[in-house]
Image: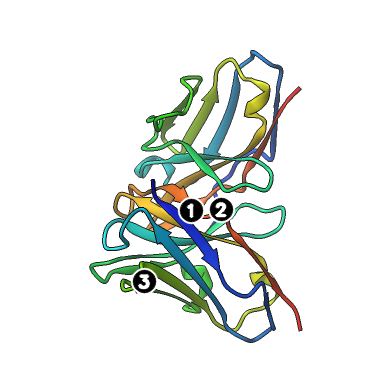
Amino acid sequence: QVQLQESGPGLVKPAETLSLTCNVSGGSITSYYWNWIRQSPGKGLEWIGSFYYSGSSNYNPSLKSRATISPDTSKNQFSLELTSVTAADAAVYFCARGLGPPGRTTFNFWGPGILVTVSS
Amino acid sequence: SYALAQPPSVSVSPGQTATITCSGPTVGDHYASWYQQRPGQSPVVVIFHDTRRPSGIPERFSGSNSGNTATLTITGTQAMDEADYHCQAWDANTVLFGGGTRLTVL
């Protein structure tokens, strides 16, 4: 059974970079699509982006190139960096495994989520 | 990107049928998925590829996708089905989610 666990600082200052890590157990990140998804308090879900180990990555254009998702195969982890954060970036951040290629993907395994607050 | 349109709330009596819709200009062009999210928990997929149920999801959950609208139907709704439901589809290589629907079982 695949398990995902997010980690990172729960508090980030405005204009700084948010950095999170997703540790994957029970499966290798060299298969499937690996994603970051966030949920602002009381709101719906927002997809941030994904990567596939072949090297392809894909991001939500609404983030205006602020997001980067990177794998670390030696630790079976992948990370998210989101630059120039504002209060609008405060959310619960989930990592999730995507089953199937773009256009057909469904997210069948999720981490528990990590709450990130943006405040000075 | 944009959010798919879902009703903010749906109410149903136990044993009745709940229907939740998800609309967007390209919903019918790609597979849709539906996720159940209970308070404080991560989403769980209940329908994928428009109509398929993952193992362990009760048969009372079903889905369809036609034109610009995907639909989640819960037949014989139970109290345990009370949760938020999110639809997910695609547009131009971007994942789209709906705003979520709060299902209340009265």
Chain under callout 2: B
Q: Earlier in the sequence, mark 1 or mark 2?
A: 2
What separation in Å lies between label 1 and label 2 (alpha carbons)? 6 Å
Answer above or below: position of B74 versus A93: above
Residue A44 in view: yes
- The residue labelled by disc 3 is A75
Position of residue B73 measured from the top left corner of the image (x, y, whole percent)? 53, 25
- Kindly check if marks 1 and 2 are in contact, taking CB atoms under 8 A apart as contact: yes
* Number of the label disc, if any, that sits on residue B24: none
Position of residue A82 measured from the top left corner of the image (x, y, whole percent)? 53, 77
Picture residue at 67% right of the left edge, 30% below the top: B82
- The residue labelled by disc 2 is B3
Position of residue B86 measured from the top left corner of the image (x, y, whole percent)? 56, 43
Answer above or below: position of A93 versus B33: below
> In the rendered image, which quarter contains the C terminus of chain B?
top right
Horizontal side, residue B42 vs residue B12: left or right:
left
Q: Nearer the viewer, residue B33 or B45?
A: B45
Answer above or below: position of A97 versus A114: above
Is the residue marked by circle 1 packed among few (<14), some (14-19), or many (20+) residues within 10 Å? Answer: many
Chain under callout 1: B
What separation in Å lies between label 3 and label 2 (alpha carbons)? 34 Å
Disc 3 with disc 1 on a shared chain: no
Picture residue at 47% right of the left edge, 78% below the top: A65
SS for tag 1?
strand
Is the residue marked by circle 2 packed among few (<14), some (14-19), or many (20+) residues within 10 Å? Answer: many
Picture residue at 48% right of the left edge, 46% below the top: B88
SS for tag 2?
loop
Q: Amino acid at mark 2?
A: Ala
- Kindly check if marks 3 and 1 are in contact, taking CB atoms under 8 A apart as contact: no
* Number of the label disc, if any, that sits on residue B96: 1
SS for tag 3?
loop
Disc 3 with disc 2 on a shared chain: no
